[in-house]
Image (cartoon, grey):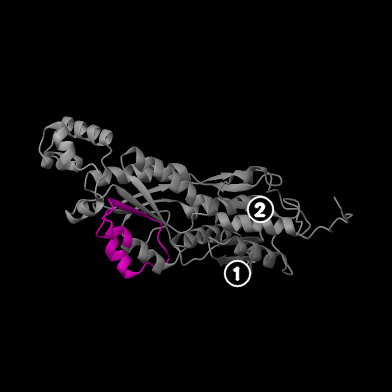
Amino acid sequence: MITIKDIAARLNVSPSTVGRALADDPRISAATKKKVTEVANEMGYVANLAARMMRGVSSNLVGLVLPDIRNSFYSTIAHALSKCVQSAGFQLTLSETEDDRMVELQHIRELASANVAGIIIVPTAKPHRETVRLLKLSPHVQLIRRQAAIGEQFFGIDDTQALFDATNHLMSLGHHRIAYIGGTDELPTGASRLLGYQKAIDSLPRNQRPGAELVRLGSPGSVEFGHEAMNALLSQAAPPTAVVAGTVRATQGILEALMVRRIAVPDQLSVVGFGDEVGFSWWGPGLTTIGLPVHDLATACGLWFVHQIRQNAAAGAPYASIATATLIQRGSTRALASAAPRERTPVSRSKSHA
């Protein structure tokens, strides 16, 4: 294995000079750092992380802690952040919590023990107090969800305005019985999106406002929840004439339920989704949906965070960057028709023995 002494001998300098250059010590000139790095790479030198940790030197790892990598919303974030930090000489390491606060704590402990350069986190609904304590010992920033206990450096989306605009769009088409299927309001995103829906609904005359029976809240990462919630709403004596989703996975569940029940969209039900997945533009008549600037948001977060780490300023003044979502209008919404949503009569088909 190539050591610092080997590099020092090759360059005819002291091992301490090589060590300081590799640690980006300000006492070493940029030219020397460049030469040391080039020779180290040429010789195949791999830093001893354990030794660096014992010296109190941060690794080049940036931790990303998020709920569910199966959700393309978060996989897009992970991809954008990976490219961003890699271009700055860092490496992204991924941890998945499935919104379990104890799993979240376990991951934060491991990242802290590895002396990571920083942590980007999409926090759970109620982070453990030990999680909060450990995060405050490392540079960190919250992404998508903001928990006041963790800190005041945050990159997110204006969820309230996004759902207000989506609901208002349906109201402008004459819909009053508008259902909402979204994530639990225990999460800051869930609460903000529900608030946007409610603000729009509250602008209706009191006798036209839909009741609580048209609101369904559940796991933001569950397609099954969205499917079951849509089925329950359609089974009501007075079903909704329109529905707006508050999560990507709920949207997928809603679309599955509508296909299974053979609901004609938008003739029988107008639908507004959340997020703009690859298939949403060609689903049925094309899904009207809330477009989210996920890639741009993650890239901005990554660039800002890397700068903060390099400036040793990640625990500094409060900072918040709020991006705006865009309503993408396609064919799944239309002016209210007189007929309430109902299931199509299944078409009889002969069995195939092919």
Q: Residue at x 43, y 43 (%)?
A: 80
Any mark on residue 271, and which? 2
Find the magenta span and give its range.
110-139
Horizontal side, residue 172 vs residue 296: left or right? right
- The amino acid type of the residue labelled 2 equals Val
Label 1 SS: helix
Which one is nearer the viewer's eye here, 54 or 198?
54
Q: Residue 21 appears at what percent x and percent y?
A: 17, 39
Secondary structure under the numbered disc 2 in the rendered image: strand
Q: Mark 1 or 2, which is nearer the eye?
A: 2
Q: How many marks?
A: 2
Residue 209: x %, y % from top left: 62, 64
Q: Residue at x 37, y 51 (%)?
A: 93
Does the image show residue 25?
A: no
Q: Is residue 235 above or below residue 69?
A: below
Q: Report the amino acid beneath label 1.
A: Ala
Q: Write down the quadrant of residue 122 in the picture.
A: bottom left
Q: Earlier in the sequence, mark 1 or mark 2?
A: 1
Residue depicted at 22% across the width and 44% down the height: 311
For this view, does 227 lie left or right of residue 129?
Answer: right
- Residue receiving disc 1: 212
- Percent position (x, y) of residue 193? 51, 58
Q: Is residue 130 magenta?
A: yes
**Percent x, y of residue 72:** 53, 50
Q: Residues within 10 Å of mark 2 (few under 14, many from 20)?
A: many
